[in-house]
Amino acid sequence: MRGSRATDSPSALKLAGLLTGSVQRTAACALLTLVLPLALTAQTVNFSREILPLLSDKCFSCHGADPSTRMAGLRLDTREEATKPRRGKAAVMPGKPEDSLIMARIAPANPNSIMPPERSHKAPLTAEQVATFRRWIEQGAAWGKHWSFEKPERGAGASIDEFISQRLTREGLRMSPAASRETLIRRVSFDLTGLPPTPEAVAAFVADQSPDAWKKVVASLLASEHFGERMAMWWLDAAHYADTDGFQADSNRTNWPWRDWVVNAFNKNQRFDQFTIEQFAGDLLPNATPEQKLATGFFRSHMTNGEGGRDPEESRIDYVMDRVNTTGTVWLGLTTGCAQCHTHKFDPITHNEYYSLSGFFNSIDEDGHAGPGKSKPYLKYSSPYAARAIAEAKQLVDSRKPAEAAARSSAEKPFALWLAAQTKEVQRGFRAWRNLRVTGLESAEGTKLTQQSDGAIQAGGPNPVQDDYRISATLPLRAVTGLKLEVLPYEGHLSRGKSGEFLLTDVKLQVRKKGNSQLRDITFRKATADFNADTKKHGGYGNITDTLDDDPRNGWTTIGSAQSAVHTGVYALAEPLTLAPDEEILFEMRHRSTTGDANIARFQLYVTDQPGPAVESVDTAPLEQLAWLKAGEVTPEPLRQKLFEQFLTTWQPYLAAKEMLDRATRQYDEVKAADAVNVMVLAERPAPRETNVLLRGVWDKKGEKVEPGIIAAIAPWPAAGYPEDKRDRLGLAHWIVSRQNPLTARVIVNDLWQIMFGAGLVRTPEDFGLQGEHPTHPELLDWLAVEFMESGWDVKHMLTLMAESQAYRQRSEVSPELQARDPQNLLLAHGPRYRLASWMLRDAALQYAGVLNPAIGGPPVKPYQPEGVWEELFMGRFKYEASEGPAQYRRSLYAFWRRSIAPTFLFDTAQRRACEVRISRTNTPLQALTLMNDATYLEASRTLAEQALSLPAPQRAAAVFQRVLGRKPDSKEATVLQREYDRVLQYYRKSSADAGLLVKVGQSSSKASSPELAAWMVISGMILNLDEAMTHE
Amino acid sequence: MNNELIRRYFLSQAGGFSLGAIALAAMGGPARAAEEPRIGLPGLPHFAPKAKRVIFLTQSGGPSQLELFDYKPGLMQWAGKELPDSVRQGQRVTTMTANQKQLVMPGVTKFGRYGQSGATVGEWLPHLTKIVDDICFIKSMNTDQINHAPAMTQMLTGNQIPGRPSIGSWVSYGLGSENRNLPDFLVMLSKMQRPSDQPLYDHYWGSGFLPSRYQGVKLRNAKDAVLYLQDPPGLPRTVRREMLDGLSELNQHRLEQTGDPEIGTRIRQYEMAYRMQTSVPELQDFSKEPEEIFELYGPDSRRPGSYAANCIMARRLAERGVRFIQLFHPDWDHHSRLPSWCTARCRDTDQPSAALIQDLKRRGMLEDTLVIWGGEFGRGVAGQGKWDSIEAGRDHHPRAFTMWMAGGGVKPGMTYGATDDFSFNVAENPVHVRDLHATVMHLLGIDHERFTYRNQGLEMRLTGVEHASVVKGILA
């Protein structure tokens, strides 16, 4: 595990010379420092690169812009303040390091007076850093802005490769040769579409000798509809899009049309400035189209909290803040959230400016509530992508109906035989319910329970306020489907309490095995009673169903009906229960009501093995009714029908077909609603709200009033061509994408670079501020930013530039020397090599298997997920049912995202709770388990195995290998594959039962099983789990 | 299992696979190198720790200190009267009771004094009374948040907004593991029958901005105790071993070609996954636990997935050196009917919590295991609903509540801090959630101010930017 330490470090590796002395955890970084001492001896000190980061890191927390934490009244964040004379001297005296007070503190004679002080836990400046300071002051202490606040200029250089090579040359390095064509097409396909290339595409590219072969590949990928899906994954993470609200209720929402709008926007290569404007303020555009309004769903993708007891205004303020912080991170690359509570300690964002910015989002016509129908403003939207999904779901239902009908009619014949046999059988008398064979009677609080000769159990002795009765018993029947409780009147009353009414709060059924200390829970499917008291009249008590929920605040009572009559409750088991010879059941009856004094006085317990209707009502079981018929009497049709339904519940061929149909029907019922849905969007309320500074960021601590406004240090208000006084979201959007704004283009091209190279030129894509990292190639970043704006914010153009560069096409293999010298590949002397996003791995597996459903858009789908993961978190409130039919094989982009528990088959994903733009890449055993055992990968392995078997034996291993990795195995690999196949085959030849079990996985389970198929499935799984298979090579 | 044991296991289990076994033994190389327990960050712990591990018994929903711990006999004379403004001092209530009068409801339980320390405990916790001399009550806990999710998020991550690492992730990141077969940070949720109003979000044990390998791993009460742990039907261990051998060999081959050390890590993680497939089911197998253990932890401990069974599991994990063990028991949110609702949760948790302390003590493990019991906030002194009816409950209350800790360098048999006559405000020795965090870190040998992680340009720490201090008064 230690080997991954380097990738765990928060990329805090600044280039040498920029090292600010912050805690550095990795040896890798130390190495880099040693080998790349650039600029330290250069003539002129660069304020922005060399001095400002030091001031920021070491000084600004006490001597920065935030007045609330300022010490000694000293500010070092402006030249004016830093050079202001204080008792004759100044902190910084240009040209006079000896007289500058700052020099006396960062390298003092007396170590006790050193700055930063020890209590700050900041490391003192290194000797080199002190020397840099001295030279800077000697040279006149030139001041400047932080680099990212200066407008980007094109600088000297005409292409990506020129900038990369220049830098490498300075370091005495050069680019690696191009990777193989197989590797290249695989790399660029994942980067631009999130999918691997098809074998045909690989073959065509390898064979294409034309000089523009590569250009054609790039262009065709950018033209693919899957391009938009790939880009949308980036954008959805940034927006923290999900299909539920989050927080307590975590209700479902139907904002997916916005997700499809994003896919479509990227596919049609909408100008990025327009893309931005529509998402900020599509609703404010003249004659806004539904799609332009839909675009604003970006700013409604945050979590919403409808927790009972929460002040909706507090929630509303949270949403406004979320929008400000998201704007900061996604477009400006600034940690604006820091200014929520106080003026930013490092970046030029004041507390007031933060709230001015929030003013743009403060008058949305929302009220802080959450949940379906309560999260206005909505757009009622009919998605063009709904019809396909609905048709697909309906088609599945239709395709499964005949099998159900056939199974039903084919059950008629065996039913007739069964009925004839039963008719004869029950002539001799039939009892559906049999007494339990009681083996032990106990109580928790002291009630004495005794069984009487008629089988009834009588309560006597002490009469505690509350008590649990525990009955141990064996079963008189082989497979028990239900349990019946009869509450019997005793001396005219049903309980031992004053009122004579009983109140049963909960029941529990468990199985105990002799010699085993643990108990097994048996679950009930349903509870039915002959009478349920009105819960509203009796403080929530009444309904027998509530005895199943382990909640003492509700339960079963029969108040309102005669105390002198027997009352009956029937419990249907979720599954038939069969006991092993050394097992017995433990039935617990809890009387734990709030007032108590309502313990049952006398009762009987029975069980039955009758399925279906018999345990779902208190009526006489159908077979008992049959027994009452006279010999030779024709079975009346209603009874015959009841018996047929009962028969079907045990007839396996029918049950299987019915279950398939039911699942498809449930899915169709859900998908149908996609026809027209409510999408949460932005809309202004008629009267704007007043915006105030919130003291320390607390929602109800209002400070001074502010007008909507921007962060002045970034760019002036308004953007060119926009009226000064129109302080609305549209104006904000124009300001964000204004040519005057130095941040947006840089931040976005950095994200695009991250998409293509695995890491940005700024390794902290969320922070371009003073505490963020400096770009590895500042001139290149600026060149790209200017190119982006001048190209008309053309995303595909920028990606084309990157993909066509030599830098991008380098091979990723690395020599030990280079690895030691630049472990983070900051210099790009070789191609980047890193694990692919987990969603790409799943999508790729579907494609390798040939089952990928390439449809675009529509309501979310539910890929395979282990049973119970939603249920256990929500104690059963939400149930996850995997999608059926073609919907199962959609891309991961469309997977239903429950905010409180992200799809389990994904790892290292954004959490979709707050805005995230940085890619997380870890390497854990849990990921290994997922990729080995998730149903999607197992099913893909099986399908790959089937493909293999369709080929002549000698070609099989190479074919699967090539399908997944896009290249042929070398001789060593071929040997290992063959050897492993032979060994696994040997196992499955001996154990064909296991072979049969293994290939059953998934909905598309295999028709034929064979040892060969099982063995190929294992080998295919091994190939899918190869490091290379999950890696951007 | 060390390397040799894996081989022997393989040889003994493999039957017809002897060829594979020989190849395996011959292979050697880094893929086979024995895995060391993952050590923590260099320089940590900062000083000698008192606690080596933590068991956090999280009571989600907010248990009532007024019924369970904080004895206020003087409230009888205030019964039914409005809470004085001088006490309330503008404290928010939730919108559930914002529109009703805040009428004082005295605690509805009888209290007794127990142990040599004379600790006050309400009648609904009879088992806790037996161990009061082993534990330290903090009656002056306070938090900033009045709603569940933000308050629990603050209790577990230091900040009300999701996105920060949970305390267990911090500890896992800083101190690493003592066990190479199990994750450092394991989480268990009680299996309940009724849907809970407060879901237990996975960000409660999330790693926030720390790498995701430090997030808590949920031990589920299901066929797969860890998600995807089980190999599919028809794929026995021998075949999995064979598949992994081939995989390692091919990955090793790739490592030699590319020089990317990440491949070496991947090989080791697959081997760890393989070991977990044995070590986790072994954990879940309670058959070797003697009968007296189940008697100690109470009848519910026989039911897998119950809080009581999870307490036994917590002890088993502690024995195996898991660093941070967190239990969640939901549904303490008794807004109504205290006598049935609150007692239901007491019945679930009282005996097993006390048993865990006794069990650890008997094994000599309490000394270096820190046990924490508590929820995200407490309950208010005003009755919710009609205060003098059996229907009444209590609303959330952040300003004062009780938690208890035991072992791991905490002074036993003491009560720290006190509330005013209404259990409303802290009267002495306040302990904010941040102070609790600082103290837990201190007991683990960590100076919370020096334990930081750089994120978004800031040096982040569990205790955040506001002042937090170690509660010296409870240190043994």
Image (tube, helix red, strand yellow):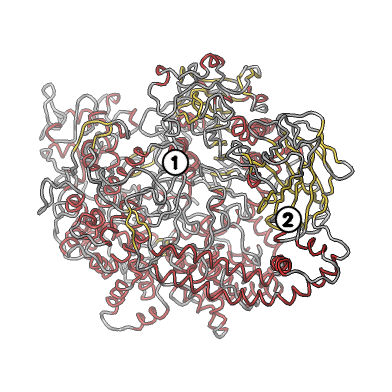
Taking the view exactly as shown, the residue that stands out farthest to the bottom is A952
Nearer to us in this view, A860 or A639 = A639
Are discs 2 and 1 less than 8 Å apart at CB?
Answer: no
- Which residue is at a point 38% across and 69% down the rendered structure image? A856
Note whether B137 is above or below A1005 in the view shown: above
Q: Amino acid at mark 2?
A: Asp
Chain containing mark 2: A
Whole-percent x, y for residue B367 in the image: 61, 29
- A567 horizontally vs A913: left or right: right
- Tell me the mark number nearer the camera, choosing from 2 and 1: 2
Note whether B394 is above or below B31 in the view shown: above
Q: Could you say which quadrant of the image residue A657 lies in?
A: bottom right
Whole-percent x, y for residue B60 in the image: 53, 37
- A625 horizontally vs A740: left or right: right
Note whether A582 is above or below A596 in the view shown: below
Nearer to us in this view, A161 or A429 = A429
User: Could you tell me which secondary element the residue under label 1 belongs to?
Assistant: loop
Q: In the drawing, what numbered circle is on residue A66?
A: none
Q: Which residue is mark 1?
A: A307
Q: Which residue is mark 2?
A: A619
Quarter placement of the C terminus of chain B:
top right
- A351 horizontally vs A257: left or right: left
Q: Could you say which quadrant of the image residue B159 lies in?
A: top left
Residue B33 shows up from this direction = no
Q: Amino acid at mark 1?
A: Glu
